[in-house]
Amino acid sequence: MKADPKVLAALNEYLSYELTGHRQYLIHAAMCRHWGLQRMARIQEAYSAEETQHAARIIDRILLLDGQATPRELGPVAGGATLAAQLARDHDLVGRAIVHLRAAIGDCEDSGDFVSRDLLREMLDDEEHHLHWLDTETRLAGQLGEQNYLQSQLG
Ligand SMILES: [Fe+2]
Ligand SMILES: [Fe+2]
């Protein structure tokens, strides 16, 4: 099945975000575990695993459209040095993914590729929930104070 090159480019660009997220959350999970923050480590691990599944679905779609999976590097992935810095880094990545997805969904719609559109719409739903979670954690950290917030991540 031949696809609009614009759709393939949009899928590949989103694949780059998925793989970058996968690596970033994996590193954050390991750092949190190293710091003894087990709750946050479990959550970051789950986000990392979810991105692997998302990436596989995007690659399947690209292949079905006779395209090639050619994600680009979005720059070095370095973990935030503190939990607050990790949340800020993740917020930045998810925010940029959302901007890309909104435009990409429009491109899929324009080319009449409603299956790719629905797939990316589903991804957008997940990213919006992720952003909401990051906002909630950041707000809680501010309300509870750093010591209390860190304590809430131990278990
Ligand atoms: Fe994802
Ligand atoms: Fe994500």
Image (cartoon, rainbow, N blue to C red):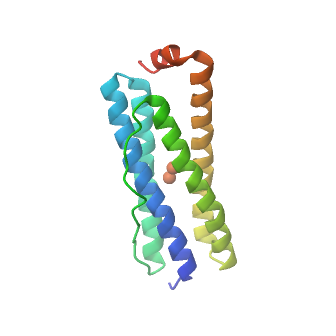
Residue 152 relative to residue 139: left or right: left
Q: Is residue 53 left or right of residue 120?
A: left
Residue 51 is left or right of residue 106, and the answer is left
Observer able to see residue 121: no
* Residue 53 in the image, given as x and y percentages of width and height: 42, 54
Q: Which residue is at the front of the view, 125 or 64?
A: 125
* x, y percent for residue 81: 39, 33
Image quadrant for the C terminus? top left
Q: Nearer the viewer, residue 76 or 2?
A: 76
Residue at the (37%, 53%) spot, across then down: 76
Residue 36 figure quarter: top left
- Image position of 31 with respect to 93: above or below: above
Q: Give residue 113's position: percent from left, percent from top.
A: 62, 76
Task: Examine the image and state in which quarter residue 32 appears.
Answer: top left
Q: Residue at x 44, y 79 (%)?
A: 67
Question: Which x, y percent locates residue 129?
Answer: 61, 43
